[in-house]
Every structure is written in C-alpha cells, then in structure tokens.
Amino acid sequence: MPTLVIAFVTVATLALAAPARAQISDGVVKIGVLNDQSGPYADITGPGSVTAARMAVEDFGAAKKNLKVEVIAADHQNKPDVGSSIARQWFDAEKVDVIVDVPTSSVALAINQVTRDKGKAFLVSGAAASDLTGKACSPNTIHWTYDTWALAHGTGSAIVKTGGDTWFFLTADYAFGHALERDTEQVVLKAGGKVLGKVRHPFPTSDFSSFLLQAQASKAKIIGLANAGADTINAIKQASEFGIVRGGQNLAGLLVFISDVHALGLEKAQGLILTEAFYWDQNDATRSWAKKFAERQRNAMPTMVQAGVYSAVLHYLKAVEQLKSDDGTKVIAKMKEMPTDDSLFGKGTVRADGRKIHPMYLYEVKKPSESKGPWDYYKLRATIPADQAFRPLNEGECPLVKK
Amino acid sequence: MTVFGIPTQALFGQLLIGLINGAFYALLSLGLSVIFGLLNIINFSHGAQYMMGAFVAYFALQWAGLGYWWSLLLAPIVVGLIGMTIERTMLKRLYHLDHLYGLLLTFGCALVIEGVFRHEFGSSGLPYTMPAALTGGYNLGFMFLPTYRAWVIVFSLVVCLGTWYVIEQTKLGSYLRAATENPALVQAFGINVPRMITLTYGFGVALAALAGVLAAPIYQVNPLMGSNIIIVVFAIVVIGGMGSIMGSIVTGFGLGMIEGLTKVFYPEASNTVIFVIMALVLLVRPTGLFGRAS
Amino acid sequence: MAGAATGYVATAEVPAAQVLRHQAIGFVVMAGFFAAAPFFGVYPVFLMKALCFALFACAFNLLIGYVGLLSFGHAAFLGSSGYAAAHAAKIWGFAPEAAILFGTMVACALGIVIGALAIRSRGIYFANITLAFAQMVYFFSVQAKFTGGEDGIQSVPRGTLFGVLDLRQTMPMYWVVLAIFLLGFVVLYRVIHSPFGQVLKAIRENEPRAMSLGYAPEHYKLIAFVLSATLSGLAGGTKAIVFQLASLTDVYWTTSGEVVLMALLGGIGTVFGPVVGALVIITLEHFLAQLGAWLTIVQGIIFVICVLTFRRGIVGELARIIRKPL
C-alpha cells in the first residue's frame, strides 16, 4: 500500500560530489520506475519496486564509483495513454535514461514503442506479455523476470509430469487469458495430458460459482486458472467454499504472485500450484536481501517482480559502468553481451531478443500446519532449468533474431 | 435427461447459483428503488456504500473482535448514519434543482469514498473469514450447496419481502408513498417529511451495507467491489421500472437466474446479457416492466 | 439540466451582434493560447491530450447544455472511434486523415443506433440507459479479437497527412490536432447559433410548446445526439493517432464520468466552458499522476463542490460577472 511519501515523486540522489562524466548525458543516470502505485497491481509492483531499484543503486555502490544515479517514480494508473505520456515527458523533458518495471501489458507495449522511438532503455519486470520478446521485440527492451509463456509452460509441463494429466480451464475472456490458456494447453497435450473442457468467463468476474460448478462436473484432476489478479483470488476463494480441493481436484494458478497468496491466506490457498521466478526463502542470499527489503516495505516480503527490478537495475548499472555511457541502445546491447550475476537470480544471460534467461520454480502452497509463520508459504515441487524455462529463441517471431 | 445438451441436474445447479447472485442484485436494487421512490434521485454512491458495509464488517472483526452476526446489525447502522449525514449536509440542498444534480453529487461522493479506501487499503482486497456456523454445505445430489449460499438466499428473501410489506402494507409505508406523490400535502397533515426523507435515504443505504456484509465472506473485501456490481444493478433497476419495490425484487432474482443460465449456454455473453435485456425491455416498455408512466 | 446552471443568463440583454463579437474575441484568444503554448515550454504531447478532451467535452456539452440530456455513456463514442481509427491505420494501412474519418464515421453510426433507442427517455432514465449501452460497448471491446483486449491496439503508425506532412514529428502533429479541434469547435458553434440550435433550446425549455409549434422533438434530439457522438468520435480518432494506441480506458465508464466533470467544472451550456474544464482536469491529472488514488479523491471533491456551490462552472461564473455570454 502506497504511502503518501512514496507516492510523491521521490528523488534519491545518491552521490553528490561526483564530477559529470562526458559520456553520461547531463551527468546523471536517471532511472524512472513506472508502475501501478495504487491500483490492482500496487502490491505486486508499486512502491516495493521503487524500494528494490533504490537498493540496487545502493548495492551497486554508485557513490563510491563516482556515478551519479537518481531514481524517480510515477503511477501509470494502468492506463496506456497516461503511461506513454509520462514516458515521453520523462525522456524528452526530464532526461530519464531508463524506465523499469511497468506492469499491465497494454502500458508496457506502449512504452516499448516510445522507448524504441527515443533510443532509450526499457527494463520490463512487471508485465507478462511474451510479445515483448516476440513480435514486438525491440533493441531497446529487456524483459527480465517472467512472461506468459514461461508461466504456462512451467506450470503445465511440471504438473502433467507429476500426475495431473486431465485439465479444465477457467479462462478470462480476453487476449491475455486466451494466450495463457493456449500456451498451457499446448504443453499439456505435448506432455501427454488431456484437456477435458474449458469455460471462458467475462473479465472481470466476481462470482465464479457457476464456472466452478462446471469445472467440478468435468472431473478433471487440475483446474487451470488462466486469469489474474482479483479474478484469480476470487476463483480460489470460492473453490474452497465449494469444496473443490477437498473433493480431490487441484487448482493451478497460471499467474499468481506471493502477494496474492498472502491476501488469500493459507487456509484458502493451500494446495495451489504455481510458477515463480523468485521466492524470498530460496537461500541465504535471498533471505538476507528480503529481510532488508521487508524492513523498508512495511514488513512485506518481495514479489518476484520486485526482485526482478533489483536484478535488472543492478545489471544495467554494471553495463553503464563498463560502457561509460548511458546511451539507451548501446547499454541494452552491452547488457545482452555481459553475463548477468546477482545474489537473487544467480548467473544468467540476456538473449538477442531481449529475454533474460534464468531458472523458474514450481511451488505448491503449504498447508496452514506446515507454515512456520507469515510469508512462509511455498514448498518447492520442481526446478525448471534455465534452458527450458523460456520460449525457444526461434519460436518467438522476433525480427531481431536472424534465422 | 438433458436440455440443449446440458444435463438437467447441472441446470438445476446453475439456476440455484443464479438465484444466489440474484439475491445480491435484489437487495441492492431494492435499496436503489426505495431511495428513488421518495427522493427521485439515482444514488450513484450505492456501490461505494455496499463496499463500506463489507469494510465495516472487516473493521469490526479486526479492531473490536466483533464477528459476522454483529456486523449484520452494525454495518447497516454505521453506513446508514453516514448516508444520512450525506443527505442532511449535501443532498437536501439539491431538491429544488433538476434531479440529475443528485446523481452527479452521489457520483462525486462515490469517487471520494472509493479513492480514500483505495488509498488506505490498496486494491488486492482483504480476506474475511466465514462464520463457523455457516461453513460446510449440503449435498443436494445435483450439486454441492455451501451452507453460506443457502443462508444468503433465505436472508435476502426475508429482508426483501419484509421491506415490501412495510412499504406497501403498513401505515408507515402509506405515508411514505403519499409523500412520494405529494410531499406538500403530507407535510400539511403534520408529518415531518424532511425527516422521513432522511430516514428513507438512510434505510436504502443500510440495505446496500447489508448486502456488503453478506458479500464479505465470499468475495474479497475490496475497495472496488462496489463499482463493478453497481452498473449491473442500475440496469436491473431500469428493467424493473425505477421506484417499483416489487419490481426490483422480482427482476433482481429473475435476472440473476437468467445470468446464471447464460453462464452455462454462452458464458462469453454473461456480462452483457443484462444490458441486452434492458435494451429490449426499453424498446417495448420505456418505463420498465413494473414502472408507472412518468 | 434545464436552465438552472447554464451560462448564458444574460443573452437576452445583449444584442446578437455584440454576442458574436466578443465570442469571436474569445475564440481568437483561445486559438492564440493554444498556438503559443508550445513555445512557452508547455509540453506539446500534454497539450494534444488536452485538445482531444476539450473537443470531447464540447461535443458532450452540446447534449447536456443545449438539449438538456445528461449522457453517462459518452466514452463509448470516444473509445469506439479510437479503436476503429487505430485498426484502420495499423492493419489496413489507412492514411491518418482517412483513419480519423473512418473512426468518426463508426462513432456516428454507433450514435445513430444508441441515440434511436435512448432518445425516447429523458432525465435519469436517459443517463442510465446511455451508461448501460456504453457498458455493452466496453464488454464488446474487452472480448473482441481486433481490439486486443487488455493490451489494446498498440504501435499505431502516425503516418503522413495527405501524403505530405510527416506526423511522426511532434510539432506537425500538434498543428493538425489544433486544426481538428478548432474545426470541431467551429462546427459546434455554428450548430448552436443556427436556427436548428434555437429549436433545440426551445425543446429544452418547453418540449410541449415546441411540439405545438410543429417541431418534432425526437428528430431534433436525435440529430443533436448523433452530432455529439460524431464529434466525440472525431476526438477519439485523433487521440488514437496522437498516442499511437487505442485502449480500454477510453471506453470505460470512468471516462464518461470524467467528461461530465469537465463540462460541469467549465460551465455547462457555455461555449468555452468545456474547453476550460478539460484543460483544468487534464492538468490536474497530469500533476496528480504521481499521487495514485488521490486523483480520484480530488476529482470527487471537485464534483461535489461544483454541484453544491459552483453550478455555473468557471466560465459560467465569469460570464455572470462580466454580464456577457461566453
């Protein structure tokens, strides 16, 4: 939840004494965090992403390296025209060099275009659209944390392998839901599973009982939720009411974040299977980072999107340092050249189409009795290795990739 | 046995589910109708007041440890009082003007209320636990009916019919109806019409809050929960005929069932079906199914 | 919304020629302001957005200010035209002028259909019905394939106007938007001051009497409705080309509410009010963008204040003070 303080344009000047370097435009590397500060995605991205970006700047040690870095933030209200006006103004008037995060596919796709036209840099963490590294790929954009393809394939194939071979889809009836359903169905069929049925529900829907009844009647082992946000939360909540999980069927969330699980509570969410790129309780490094994050963020643990913002900004600053320039196109090219390495995502690479590559993880939500306390929510079911986690380079139809 | 390829068993289930949703529609459109009947304004804050009802339930549990049953009593009173304050301080200044100003004012109020809650509580919603007495369910053979949903239907029916009885069959109700027709005359009989108006607005708002408490355990308690449902309820009120008490109850339940059937036969259209029906009804009867000519 | 809040209270006292003269002065001031603003550091993209909404608000004002009908579903026209123009420009490769024209025509057609059904009612019923139709358009836009659902239509090419003027540059685009706005504004102005506009006002003031004089109110109302929808469409199509995208925001009911606010704040039934209202609201949105939910709260408060104490709006109050219609 945003505080007024964070909601205001927050400017963190981290090094004051640094002499301006010739290649850094106007002497400052300016990072603009543009996301949803108050709407449905505020808990997933929002002020937490701003904090993560700040932490990256601090951990990079900008001050010691004589690099002047500023972080500013704004709320795009999930409206593409608002987002693209802010982006244009940031690039034109406020000398912002890189925009990060940007949840909501429509806004991210709009900014993808603006960034390309202006020759700046764009690091996506919050948006899910796999088109950003497909048909809409750009030499100025890197898609960092996850995308619909990765979630669909991760969840779909891993579940079929562990015995969940009959599926029923509850799909939000718009482009995003269709894409999730299509990608998941593909992988379910390929892995030898069967799709027993699907129902397209209007977006948004608050009452899922009718659709859940249809899912229940299908007797499918897995009910795939190809929707997001409040729709997913309501579907899960009502599934528990109608005794779906007790009846032996399992829910698979195709786009669920830890903040959603937190909002639902373990009682309702237990048994849910989902794919994430990051979980705070993975290892010592993630735990200690998450602890620092939570101290600054009203005790909320970071989501994978917020962790992705940290990782992306860190890698960006490393590239700027190496290149001694903040020219958007050049920095992105440099970022693709350099291997990535940070404490949250480990070692990885950035592909020619702008896709950041790292492993993905399949988690199951714990039962209330298994959890040791708040935010202890997941147990690992499978790790999807980096080379299988994302869409193969030649299948994305990205014009930047030479066949 | 099947109907259009759907087993009758499943059909019964869906009709029942539709009836449950209809219970919410009926409660909300009833409140709107009561307000419209006497004040002649469309209460655009109705959705925000429904949301506030759910939040009062949430606060009562979090801060005071008061459970669901207390909330059923508390939320209508608290939100009703807030509503009456709005009526006393703002709405009443507009009665001499075009009724559209009432609509605009309540629209503005709805924006403020929703904005404040969104600012304070974000948008992902807060969980509200179901009361222990209403968990579990019955196996009806053709479907599993959660106890809570059955409770929603029964409770809503009782409240709706009670309201109808009071307004249409009692002396108090007859004053109310008379004031709708000719406030000056009723005032002349020594009845305090302004106070009656305030209480009526408060009562309509209280119905919205009551629906909010009913919704809290099944939906997330969410600042935006009202803005999604209210536009559908507006359409229902138009179909039923604005200001008609029985009309809003019958169309509320009826359209819930029609919507439920659409979810089986053509789920893609389940959001639009009510608006399509509205357009059709208006073509035939511009004042709605149960409305009187204006 | 009869009489109570309109800005031309003084019309009867001022001779027609004088009205024309100082409204012409107002027009020149307004055009000059928009022509000069980009050179005084006002960000042109922001101004273009303001101009699109100003035209939208003017079109909306025709209905509420001169026919007395409050439409709560005008976003349907803004948004559907945006989708049509964006689709035409991106998929069919239409030139920008053709794309905007196509969008405008779609809005016009939609206006005929919705108008024919809605015009039979008035007052609160009319507001409710237009709102419901707008919701149908919204749900259609969410589900239809060509609109791209939540993603919207993105990367719409701005193209070259009439094959000569490259709109990818900011300033040429700005001049085109300004020209479109002024054109729409003049059309509306002419309509309001034509015999047709006089009949509209007569209907608003006293429908039975207008009927007894031999005018068919339904026809006049429908024409005004369609005209309002068409010009809203012109604004929407232009906006889609400027921002190179069409999205669900423009068909959502909050946009319908926003345009009501613009007209109300600027002054319902005044010629310049909607422009001022749009400018204020868009500026507010721009500066409050960082504040998230506060934007909604501030908008709501302005709504309440306007309705309670400021029903003439900014321009309406100004007109009252200088005792000349604006």
Image (cartoon, coloured by chain):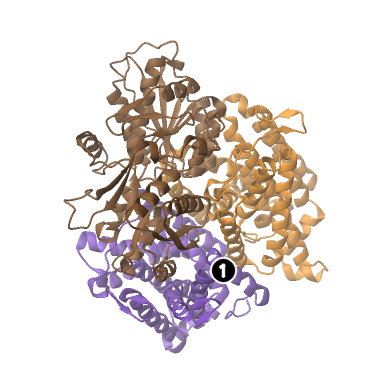
Residue B63 lies in what quarter of the image? bottom left
Left or right: A299 as drawn, with respect to B114: left
Supply the letter of whichever chain is purple.
B
Furthest residue to the front? Answer: A192
Quadrant location of residue A326?
top left
Residue B89 seen in render = no
As rendered, which of A53 and B50 lies closer to the eye?
A53
Would you place residue C324 above or below residue A63 in this image? below
Nearer to us in this view, C189 or A212 = A212
Query: Can residue A141 be seen?
Result: yes
Q: Chain C takes which shade in the image?
A: orange
| Chain ID at mark 1 | B
Residue C105 locus on image (x, y percent): 74, 51
Position of residue C298 measured from the top left corner of the image (x, y, whole percent):
45, 47
Q: Quadrant of the C terminus of chain A?
A: top right
Residues packed near mark 1 inside 10 Å, few (<14), some (14 to 19) or many (20 plus): some
Instruction: Give the amino acid at mark 1.
Output: Val
Residue occupying the point 61% across, 58% down: C137
**Residue B223 in picture, x, y percent from top left:** 38, 56
Residue farthest right in this picture: C214
Residue A184 left/right relative to C168: left
Across and down, in percent, residue A101 comes to 41, 36
- Would you say A22 lies left or right of C89 here? left
Residue A157, placed above or below residue B293? above
Q: Residue at x 33, y 32 (%)?
A: A310
Q: Residue at x 73, y 62 (%)?
A: C221
User: On the image, numbered disc 1 is attached to which residue?
Assistant: B273
Q: Secondary structure at mark 1?
A: helix
Chain in brown (letter): A
* Snapshot quadrant of residue C195: bottom right
Instruction: Work out whether residue C262 or residue A152 is closer to the camera in this orientation and state it.
Output: A152
> Up-down: is C54 above or below B56?
above
